Amino acid sequence: MQTDTDVLTFPAPRPAADLAWREDALCAQAGPEFFFPAPGSSTREAKQLCGACEGRVACLEYALAHDERFGVWGGLSEKERLRLRRTQRS
């Protein structure tokens, strides 16, 4: 007999509207290497572009919800997002 605790549940797929921020995001106009720099390279320029982007908050929320571990998302680097996650748990 199967109980409620035996059934695995997965998050529902996100509606396309939740990803609409990507269409107008400034990062779409720059190459991926801009937001995924080589280790040790500066993320300053990517963060500046993010700061001017209207989709920045949605982008950051997406990165946190999907555990994006690389690159600049929503104006934060990998380390900054990790710190943010840790402070949210506390």
Image (tube, rainbow, N blue to C red):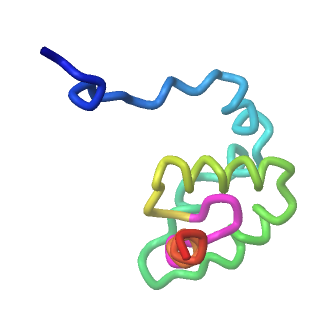
- For residue 39, side relative to residue 87 (left or right): left
Left or right: residue 45 versus residue 1 is right
Task: Decide whether residue 75 is among the magenta residues.
Answer: yes
Q: Main secondary structure of the magenta part?
A: loop
> Which is more toward the observer, 36 or 14?
14
Figure check: 69 above or below 45:
above
* Image point (72%, 24%), residue name: 17
Nearer to the camera, 64 or 59: 64
Residue 88, percent across and down? 60, 70
Residue at the spot x=73%, y=30% of the render?
20
Q: In the figure, 39 relative to 37: above or below?
A: below
User: Looking at the image, how many numbered discs can be counted on the residues?
Assistant: 0
Farthest residue to the top: give it.
Answer: 1
What is the x, y in percent for residue 90?
Answer: 55, 76
Residue extending farthest to the left is: 1
Picture coordinates of residue 21, whole percent (x, y)? 75, 38
Is 82 rendered above or below residue 8? below
Image coordinates of residue 54 in percent, x first then y, are: 86, 50
Nearest to the observer: residue 2 or residue 72: 2
Residue extent of the magenta highlight: 72-79
Q: Is residue 62 magenta?
A: no
Screen quadrant of the N terminus: top left
Taking the spot 65% from the left edge, 51% from the top edge, the residue there is 61
Q: Residue at x 46, y 84 (%)?
A: 40
Q: Taking 29 as reference, is 13 above or below it?
A: above
